[in-house]
Image: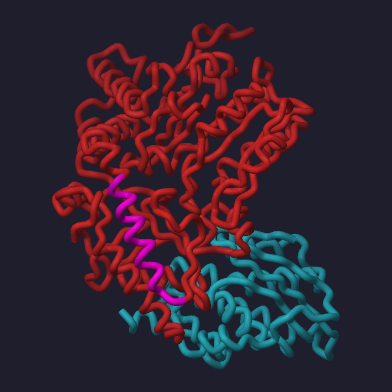
Amino acid sequence: MALPGLLPDLEVLRKDFPILSRTLAGGQPLIYLDSANTSQKPQVVIDTMVDHLERHNANIARAMHQLGAESTAAFEEARDKVAAFINAPSRDEVIFTKNASEALNLVANTLAWAGEHQVGPGDEVVITEMEHHSNIVPWQLLTQRTGATLRWFGLTDDGHLDLSTIDDLITEHTKVVSLTWVSNMLGTVNPVEEIARRAHEVGALVVVDASQAVPQLPVDVLGSGADLVAFTGHKCVGPTGIGVLWGRREVLDALPPFLGGGEMIETVAMERSTYAGIPHKFEAGTPPIVEAVGLGAAVDYLGHIGMERIHAHEQAITAYALEGLRTVPGLRVLGPLDAAQRGGAISFEIDGVHPHDVATVLDTRGVAVRAGHHCAKPAHARFGVQSSTRMSSYLYTSPTEIDALVEGLEYTRDYFGLG
Amino acid sequence: MSTELDSLYQEIILDHYKFPHHKGLREPFEAEVHHVNPTCGDEVTVRVHLEDAADGAMVADVSYDAIGCSISQAATSVMADLVIGKPVDEAMAVQDSFLTLMQGKGSVEPDEDVLEDGIAFAGVAKFPARVKCALLPWMAWKEATNRATDVDLPGAPATSLETPEPRRHP
């Protein structure tokens, strides 16, 4: 099918992802529409990780042998690749964590401690009602522990941030504004630059959860206006166990260390220690080495295809999916209905069928979707729903797979006697 | 494909889903608990009313308010049918029997004399992602009953060991 914006040679590209050719119980082909949960991995990422384990495995930065040098070089090369991929001005500003949650917790924890950016009583932290739980709970913990106040942007009925309250929310009391770039539930793409500008006027730090943005959009951390950006490797064709925190050098330098241990020190005496500079200051202990190497291969792969083209593909598939979903009676999409304003995760509910039941019926047809609250309970509550079904596409998703979803949903309605 | 689905969505289950028995929160009650399935957000509030009978405590009423999928809703309805009017000991044995069925990965043959409509859930045991849906109301009922009989002391919290999924929100 020729949709404008679709990646050319999609069938060839799909062969890069070995899992897409497997079959499920009953010989059903896999139709994977759960990429916002985790993406599938291309052969090159798998091979790079296997090669590292087979031929270059050693601990990094502390082994005085050839393998140690190779492993260190591979790990640090991955940092260079990630830095280039997100347009970080310096490789030292790229901190490897285990996932986006750890990156966000690193920031929320270190802000509690003495330092230039310390959050205390009377200060305010502003988040939004559409955050993933991992960008809500760390800020609840921070404000509860420090006596600061947590505030948040509400949502409009069409799934956007309600910016009409921005001047009431972001004030001279605001120390931190933390928001998602692309919502994992509503799909909404937020105006990060505009909010960052207002936050900077009052001297607040801007933290951005880019977990759903980095896989889909060309991300320029510098251009975004953010001070700190967190994302995870496994949603952008990399492995699990590796995340990234990017931060402006001045900010990272000003934050105190997070975890203490090996690698993050300059020197240690029994009385006190001095700390390494960034990035190592925030990388205590043996890091996820092969996972970082895998992430390096992943961003290479995405860069080779081109994020502009991947974004265009996502937009084309999302528009096609929205069109298809519209034909299913009793189906309501939560979030913006215009593909140009959203990412590739589409949550919806169907009158008379619970999302669990939808997901189970689809699963027996080989269609993998997510059902539940997608770690965004407040956003569901805002729209008066307990849970939803979510389909999420990626660069390997084909229009045929969307057709299979829509047919599966029709079948689901029939099965539950709604036809 | 549809055979596999039919083994999950037995007619009995869909009937209980559409027309739940004993639904609603009623008085009197000695204990009320609220359980949530944290992975999907299904919720159930269960109230238990016990009465003294000749041979010990008896389950006089179980009332509930629940939101969730067809499996958890039907399981709540079937559970209320099964335990209301039974001596607590006997009702606990039914709970145990249902738990064994659900944890049997499809290899346990259900006893219709004990589980009645509950045997319709035998197919659920083959869907690992859905077992917790069927167990949600039963775990809530067990905790409420334990509280009502004041045996929710040492030993009784073992319910949390038997079921990894439902989280307690007293």
Residue B103 is at least partly visible in this image: no
**Which residue is located at x 34 percent, y 73 percent?**
A408
**Which residue is located at x 78 percent, y 69 percent?**
B147
Q: Nearer the viewer, residue B79 or A359?
A: A359
Colour of chain A in the rendered structure image = red
Q: Main secondary structure of the magenta part?
A: helix
Seen in the picture, residue B147 relative to A13 is either above or below; the reply is below
Which chain gets the cyan colouring?
Answer: B
Q: Position of residue A138 (x, y in %)?
A: 62, 37
Q: Quadrant of residue A221?
A: top left
Q: Nearer the viewer, residue A263 or B42?
A: B42
**Which residue is located at x 62 percent, y 39 percent?**
A127
Is residue A209 a member of the stretch shown in magenta?
Answer: no
Q: Position of residue A331 (x, y in %)?
A: 47, 71
Direction front: furthest residue: A164
Quadrant including the C terminus of chain B? bottom right
**Which residue is located at x 44 percent, y 40 percent?**
A211
Indicate the colouring scheme. by chain
Where does the magenta region start and end? A312-329
Seen in the picture, residue A206 relative to A393 is either above or below; the reply is above
Q: Nearer the viewer, residue B12 or A202?
A: A202
Residue A22 is at least partly visible in this image: yes
Q: Nearer the viewer, residue A299 or A180?
A: A180
Left or right, residue B46 beside residue A68 = right
Left or right, residue A42 beside residue B143 = left
Q: Position of residue B96 (x, y in %)?
A: 60, 76
Left or right, residue A1 beside residue B11 = left
